[in-house]
Image (cartoon, rainbow, N blue to C red):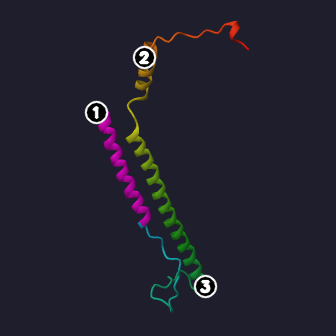
Amino acid sequence: MNTQTGRKVVSGIGILIAIVLFCLGIFTTVPNKKIGLSSLSDDGYEAYVGGDAYNIQIEAALRGGQIAGGMSQRAIYISASGLILVISLFGLVKKDHPSAVLLEQEHTIEEAHIPAIENTPDDTF
């Protein structure tokens, strides 16, 4: 397997990973903001301490952490997919080794026999 084929295979795998991460970012669920009360809904709050107001405050703090974590997870998945996609696309369009291209250009200039231009006192303004 030559370098061009290997680079294309690795870039293709990177693009697939980017697509999977993007889908994970889109379809990751963020918890609902609503905190239900035990008398109003079936999914009510859990009793952490004796008072109702304290339980609601604790539940709100925990729910806020879950929401922040879910949104951070989505942002990380989507941004990582974008980064991997760009790197993979650069791998697809990258030419052979850059030093080989530079050597080829230098060799072409040497073969052209372009005379060197020398500055003389008459050339100054």
Confirm whether the magenta stretch covers residue 22: yes
- Most extreme residue toward the bottom is 39
Name the quadrant containing residue 6. top left
Say left or right for 52 vs 122: left
Q: Circle 2 sits on which residue?
A: 107
Q: Earlier in the sequence, mark 3 or mark 2?
A: 3
Say left or right for 72 vs 121: left
User: How far, Cα to Cα, is label 2 from label 1?
Assistant: 25 Å
**Residue 10 rendering spot, x and y as whole percentages:** 34, 43
Q: Nearer the viewer, mark 2 or mark 1?
A: 2
**Disc 2 packing (10 Å; few <14; some 14–19; many ≥20):** few
Q: Residue at x 40, y 62 (%)?
A: 24
Q: Circle 3 sits on which residue?
A: 53
Q: Earlier in the sequence, mark 3 or mark 1?
A: 1
Quadrant, the N terminus: top left
Vertical relation: 3 (above or below) 71: above
Q: Residue at x 48, y 89 (%)?
A: 41
**Residue 31 rendering spot, x and y as whole percentages:** 48, 73
Q: Amino acid at mark 2?
A: His
Q: Return the mark for residue 79.
A: none
Stretch in magenta: 1-26
Quadrant, the C terminus: top right
Q: Circle 1 sits on which residue?
A: 2
Vertical relation: 121 (above or below) 87: above
**Residue 118 rendering spot, x and y as whole percentages:** 61, 9
Using the rendered image of the protein, determine whether residue 44 is visible from the camera's viewpoint: yes
Q: Amino acid at mark 3?
A: Ala
Q: Nearer the viewer, mark 3 or mark 2?
A: 2
Q: Earlier in the sequence, mark 2 or mark 1?
A: 1
